[in-house]
Amino acid sequence: MKTRKLMILGVLVACVAVGVLFLPVREWFMHLEGYVKGLGRIGPIAVALVYVLSTILFIPGSALTIGSGTLFGLKTGFLVVLVGANLGALCAFLLARTFLREKVARWADGNPKFRSLDRAIGRQGFKMVFLSRLSPAFPFTLLNYLVGLTAIRTGAYVLANLLGMLPGIFLYVYIGAAARDALAGHANMSAGFYQQLLKYVGLLATVAVVVIVTRIARKAIREAEETQNGDTATERPRLDPDDKPTSFEKMMIADDAYDRWLIENCHPPNWVNPTPGGKYNLVVLGAGTAGLVSAAGAAGLGAKVALIERNLMGGDCLNVGCVPSKGVIRAARAAYDARNGKEFGIQLACELNIASFSAAMERMRRLRAGISSHDSAERFRKLGVDVYIGHGRFVGLSAVEVDGKRLEFDRAVIATGARAAELPIPGLAEARYYTNETIFTLTELPRRIAVIGAGPLGCELAQAFGRFGSEVYLIEALHGIMPNEDPDAAEIVRQSMIDRDGVKLMCCGKELRVSNGGSGTKRLTVDSHANHYDFVVDEILVAAGRKPNLEGLGLEEAGAQYTAQGVVVDGRLRTTNPKIYAAGDVCSRYKFTHAADAMARIVIANALFFARRKVTDLVIPWCTYTDPEVAHVGYYEKEARAAGFDVATITESLDHVDRAILDSENDGFARVHYDNKTGRILGGTVVARHAGEMISELTLAMVAKQKMDVLSSTIHAYPTQAEVLRKVGDAYMRTKLTPTVKKLFEKWLAWRR
C-alpha cells in the first residue's frame, strides 16, 4: 500500500512537471488573471461564493485556497479565503444542526456511551474544533457536518473556526502568491536578494509552525479521546506513608545458605554508599529490570549514573517473580512427566516421593542465587554505576535524597515497579496468606491450598501445586480462567488443569469469605454458579491485582503526576516533569520483564540523546507458562475490529502437526489475525507446550511489518511444533486461489500439456 501511494504521488509530480515545462501554463494564467481583474470588485466576491458552495458540497478547498493566492496575491487572497471558508463552514454546520441534530439527540438518549461523548463535545467543543482546524490536512468539509450533529454551541464553533483556520489559510495562500510570481515571470528583483531570501525563509517557517502545531493538536485530541474512553485515570490516589512494599527479609529464608548468598549479592549488609561527586546524567530509582537496564545501558555509553534500591536488586523478576516461579513450574512439570510416562512405555516402580517438593524449592533457591550475581550491587559498581542501597525520594524538580545525601541530576528514571495488591475479602487480612512475594519461602508442600485469582500467576502456580500433589482450589470472580486471553486458548488450559491436574475451579465466585478453620487451617466459603462451597485449606495464595510502588517517592516535590494505575507518562515515557522519565510496572499496563527492558531502552535513547522513540511503537508478546503455554502478540480479533481493520483469522490445530502428535502434545493451536485488505499480520495466539518459544516468529514478522505470505515462505525444520505457523501461512495462500484464478491455471496447464 505504501509503495502504491508513493507511485501515485510520483506520477502526479511528474505530470505537474511536464505540464509546467511543455504546456502554456503561463499564458493560461495570464488570461485567467486578466479575466478576474476584468470583473472588478465582483471577482473576489465570486471566488468567495464558489468557496462557500464547494464547502457545502464536500469539495476540498485546498486548490481554491492556493488559487486565491495566485489570482489575488497574499493580502486580498487571504481575506477572500477567510470569508469564504468561514461562511461555507457555518452554512454546512447549520444545515446539519437544523435537519439532523434532533434525530441524533434522540438516538443518543438510548446510547450511554454516545450521550457521554456528545456532552463532552458540548463542554470542550471550542478546544476540539480549534485544535482540529489548526491542521491544514484535516477534512474540513466533513468536520463541518459532523460537528453540527453534536451539542457544541454555534458561537463557540464560529470562533474556533475563525481562529483555527488562520495558520492554514495563510500557508496555502502564501504558496499561491509565490506561485503567482513564478508563473507571471516578473518577480520583484528590485527588492534585493535579502528581501527575497526573507520571503522564502518566512514560507519555510510557516510550514514548520503548522507542522509543529499539527503534532500538538493531534496529541491533544488523542489524549481527549483516551480520557473520554476511560483509558486515562484522572483521580490521584491518597498514598498511605505506612503502606510499603514487602521487605526482603520476608521474601527470603533467613537461615538458608542460598538465600543468604542472594542477599549478599542484591542487598549487601555491609555496603557503603558512595559520596556524590557532582551532577549525574541519570539517577535511577529502583533496581528491577527497568532500573538495571537503564543504569547499565547509560553507564555503558559513558553517562554518570546513580542507581538507588531500598530492597533487593533484581526486583520482582529475579527474587519473587519470573525466575523462582519458572524454577518451580519446571520441577512440577518433571513430576507430572514422571507420573505420566506410561503412554511412552515408561513407568516408575514406586510412587513419587512428596519430599520432592522440598528438593524442588531448594533447587530453585540455588539457581536463583546463582543468577543473582548478574544483578548484584558489586557487578553494577564495576560497570561504573554509583549504587546506593537505601530509600530514595525526590526533594525537588532535579534532585533526589538517599541516605542523607543529595543527588543532583540532569535526568531521572522512576522504575520502582509494583507489588501485590490487598484484596477487600472479609477475613483475609486476619488470616495468614501468601502472595507472589512470599510464596517461594515455602519448604513443605501444603496438603490443601486455595489460590485466589485465575490470571496468569494464579493458573501457573495452581497447576504447579496440583502436580506436586496438593489439593488445589482455584477461585476466580469472572467466568473461566485467564479472562484477558483468547477464550479458546483459556478453555484448553482449563480442561488440562481440571482433567489432568485435579484443580478444582470455582469461577464467577461471589461472596468469598475467609475465617479460622481451627488447628492452623483456613476456612473459605464462596458461591459459584448457584452452588455454595465451604472448605478448609492449609494455605492461601492471593494471585490477583497489582499496585504500583508510589509511596515515599516525593512525586509531588518532583512535579510528577500519578494515578491509581501508576506514574503518568506520555508516549516517550516522560512524566509531567520533562526531566523525569518512568519505565516498567510503575507506569505501564504491560507488567512483564521484557516490556520493562524494552521501555528502559527507550528511556536511554530519549533522555540522553534527544531521540523521539515511542513506547506505542513496541510490539510486545507475552506468555502464560501453564501446560500447555498460552502466548500472544498484537491485537486480539475484537480489538483489531474496534481499531477499524477488516480482520480475517486463520486457526491451525496442533492435531495436524506431526511433531505435536509424536510428543502427545497436540492440545493446542496457532491463530493469526490479519488485515484482509493488505495481508498484514495484526496479532496471534499460540497454545502449545512451548508456545513461549514459538511466539517470537510472529513477533518478528510484526516488527518487520510482514504479511501473511511470509509464514508460508519461511522454511521450518521438520519435525517441529513451530510448523503450525507455516500451516497458517499455507492456509492464507490457499485463500488467494479463487475459483477464477484456479480456472485460469487449469487452462494454462492444459495448454502446456
Image: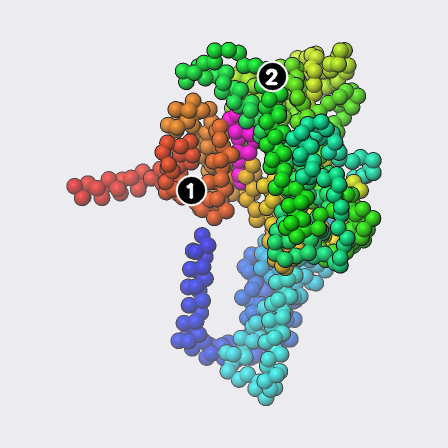
Residue 253, x across and y down, in percent: 70, 27
Quarter of the picture containing the C terminus is: top left
Q: Earlier in the sequence, mark 1 or mark 2?
A: 2
Residue in the picture at 64% in, 62% down: 212
Give the prevailing secondary structure in the magenta stretch: strand
Residue in the picture at 52% in, 79% down: 182
The amino acid sitting under disc 2 is: Ala
Snapshot quadrant of residue 539:
top right
Which label is found at residue 708?
1
Which label is found at residue 748?
none
Q: Residues within 10 Å of mark 2 (few under 14, many from 20)?
A: few
Tell me if residue 699 is in the magenta stretch.
no
| Pair 1/2: label in front | 2
- Residue position marked by numbered label 2 in the rendering: 355
658 vs 709: above or below: above
546 vs 92: above or below: above
- The residues tagged by marks 1 and 2 sit, at their Cα atoms, a distance apart of 49 Å
Viewer-nearest residue: 731 or 80: 731
* Magenta-tinted stretch: 623-635
Residue in the picture at 42% in, 42% down: 708
